[in-house]
């Protein structure tokens, strides 16, 4: 930890962290343009070009996360009813590691890359070609609610390391976290270079009226589309981290107990509000009963007193998302095989699996982004691959539980993609019969 010592403080400081969390307050709309222009002016001073400056900010961020840990944990508990263990694992320690990783590699990432033949034409071989890494400028980072610290601060670590200044917009659906992050950034990072704007649609829209050098958005595809359209007006580059309907494949060669345990874990961590968790499991028909038994067993081991009584299971973030997930359960024509309990007063939804028989089922059509998932029986792996391609051709993740060969095939080989139109026509025909 030598390179993470608190060397940035001129004098020894004492840290007293006030545990009270300030009530959520949106940033006044009329102040947003000046917040952005301050970040831009700071960038223009060229101070962010210095690697030493960037490293200092990364070290400050590391210690800020460490010092604010109790408050961040409390805020995550307040907003998502999340256990400290899960928050440490998925947000706090993750980010500290990110800071350390970046500090360890920043020199290597930032240095010029030399180019030699055959990367340069022979005619210019005598010239000293190199790729120089220049900071883009001032970036806007818009975060989602599900991992509200990690998914906002991780891109910030990248921005700092690249020598950019940044304005952050946390999710308003996790208001306690949003306020703690604002304090953390304002108290610990260089003023003028980094700022936090709090609010919802109005504030984000105001931010989108400003010309940025890069926008990093994490959230839903629907809002991602709005952001991308607006950014296109000023030809601003965007990174969109969106949602997905992720498949899992289970074949007769799978270890069903292992598959059940892992898939259930994916739907219980953060109460399934994870962009990478499976939306549906494609499983060979003859295995469904055994797989459901394995899921029930895993459920009992994870929640011996029942999921609702568990101190470790988070809750759905708010009533709107609760209603959205419940609607999927209300509308499914499938058969609930584990779970099914809901309680709006606690925003509680039990980890739930539903065996469905159609790709049109509500459980297959939407990203559940909660603790519920579909089990879709298929005849063959080919059929499973085709269904997965039909549901969402570019999911964020896929989980393959089969033989090594089958798992490799699950990477959507191109020849199957070419067969898609034919399969789609056949499938539509058979589903209308
Ligand atoms: P969201 O799209 O509703 O909100 C994301 C951000 O956009 C928030 O800061 C919000 O204030 C802002 N926003 C909302 N509506 C807006 C509008 N009309 N105009 C401008 N800004 C607006 O997403 P969410 O509900 O917070 O997060 C869930 C989604 O994010 C899921 O789809 C999930 O899969 C996805 N996600 C993706 C990743 C990834 O890394 N790919 C990670 C986490 C979450």
Image (spheres, grey):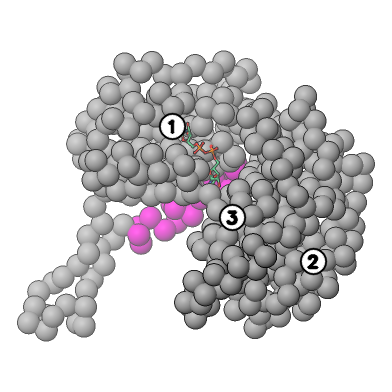
Q: Write down the residue under mark 3.
A: 245
Q: Quadrant of residue 325?
A: top right
Is residue 143 part of the magenta span, yes or no? Answer: no
What separation in Å lies between label 3 and label 2 (alpha carbons)?
A: 22 Å
Rendered-image quadrant of the C terminus: bottom right
Residue 59 in the image: x percent, y percent? 45, 42
Q: Which residue is mark 1?
A: 169
Circle 2 residues within 10 Å: few <14, some 14–19, many ≥20: some
Task: Tell me if residue 108 is in the magenta stretch.
Answer: yes
Residue 53 as seen in the image, left or right of residue 285: left
Depth check, mark 3 against mark 2: the one in front is: 3
Q: Earlier in the sequence, mark 3 or mark 2?
A: 3
Q: CA distance from mark 2 to mark 1?
A: 39 Å
Of 98 and 415, which appears nearest the observer? 415
For numbered disc 3, what is the local secondary structure? Answer: loop
Q: Which mark is residue 258?
A: 2
Q: For ligand 1, tell me if the residue under mark 1 lies within 8 Å.
A: yes
Residue 207 is left or right of residue 7, and the answer is left
Rendered position, 121 above or below 37: below
* Mark 3 C-beta closer than 8 Å to ligand 1: no
**Residue drawn at the location 38% of the way across and 55% of the way down:** 106
The residue at the far right in this view is 305
Front residue of 145/35: it is: 145
Picture residue at 75% right of the left edge, 66% below the top: 377
Residue 8 picture location, percent across and down: 41, 36
Part of the protein shown in magenta: 89-109
Q: Dot 3: few (<14), some (14–19), or many (≥20) neighbours within 10 Å?
A: many
Q: Percent x, y for residue 127? A: 9, 74
Image vertical order of residue 268 relative to residue 311, above or below? below
Does residue 91 appear in this view? yes
Question: How far from the left and from the top, in percent, is residue 42?
Answer: 25, 32
- Image: 414 above or below 298: below
């Amino acid at each position: 930890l030598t390179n993470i010592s608190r060397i940035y403080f001129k004098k020894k400081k004492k840290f007293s962290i006030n545990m009270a969390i300030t009530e959520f307050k949106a940033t006044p709309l009329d102040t947003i343009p000046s917040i952005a222009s301050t970040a831009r002016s700071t960038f223009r001073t060229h101070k962010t070009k210095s690697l030493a400056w960037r490293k200092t900010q990364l070290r400050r961020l590391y210690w800020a996360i460490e010092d604010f840990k109790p408050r961040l944990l409390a805020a995550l508990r307040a907003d998502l009813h999340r256990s400290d263990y899960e928050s440490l694992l998925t947000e706090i320690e993750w980010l500290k590691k990110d800071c350390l990783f970046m500090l360890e590699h920043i020199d290597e990432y930032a240095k010029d890359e030399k180019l030699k033949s055959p990367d340069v034409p022979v005619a210019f071989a005598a010239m000293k070609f190199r790729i120089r890494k220049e900071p883009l400028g001032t970036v806007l980072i818009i975060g989602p609610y599900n991992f509200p610290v990690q998914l906002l601060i991780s891109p910030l670590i990248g921005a700092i390391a690249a020598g950019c200044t940044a304005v952050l917009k946390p999710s308003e659906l996790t208001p306690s976290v949003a306020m703690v992050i604002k304090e953390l950034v304002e108290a610990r990072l260089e003023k003028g270079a980094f700022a936090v704007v709090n609010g919802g649609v109005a504030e984000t829209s105001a931010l989108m009226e400003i010309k940025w050098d890069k926008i990093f958005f994490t959230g839903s595809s629907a809002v991602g589309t709005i952001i991308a359209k607006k950014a296109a007006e000023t030809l601003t580059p965007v990174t969109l981290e969106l949602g997905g309907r992720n498949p899992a494949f289970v074949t007769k060669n799978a270890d069903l107990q292992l598959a059940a345990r892992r898939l259930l874990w994916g739907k219980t961590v953060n109460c399934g509000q994870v962009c990478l968790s499976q939306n549906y499991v494609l499983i060979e028909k003859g295995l469904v009963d055994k797989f459901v038994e394995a899921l029930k067993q895993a459920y009992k081991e994870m929640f011996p007193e029942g999921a609702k009584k568990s101190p470790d299971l988070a809750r759905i973030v708010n009533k709107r998302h609760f209603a959205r997930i419940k609607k999927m359960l209300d509308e499914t024509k499938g058969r609930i095989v584990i779970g099914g309990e809901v309680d709006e007063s606690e925003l509680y939804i039990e980890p739930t699996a539903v065996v469905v028989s159609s790709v049109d089922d509500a459980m297959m059509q939407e990203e559940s982004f909660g603790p519920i998932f579909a089990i879709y029986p298929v005849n063959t792996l080919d059929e499973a691959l085709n269904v997965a391609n039909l549901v969402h051709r570019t999911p964020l993740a896929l989980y393959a539980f089969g033989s090594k060969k089958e798992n490799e095939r699950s990477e959507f080989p191109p020849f199957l993609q070419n067969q898609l139109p034919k399969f789609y026509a056949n499938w539509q025909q058979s589903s209308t019969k």
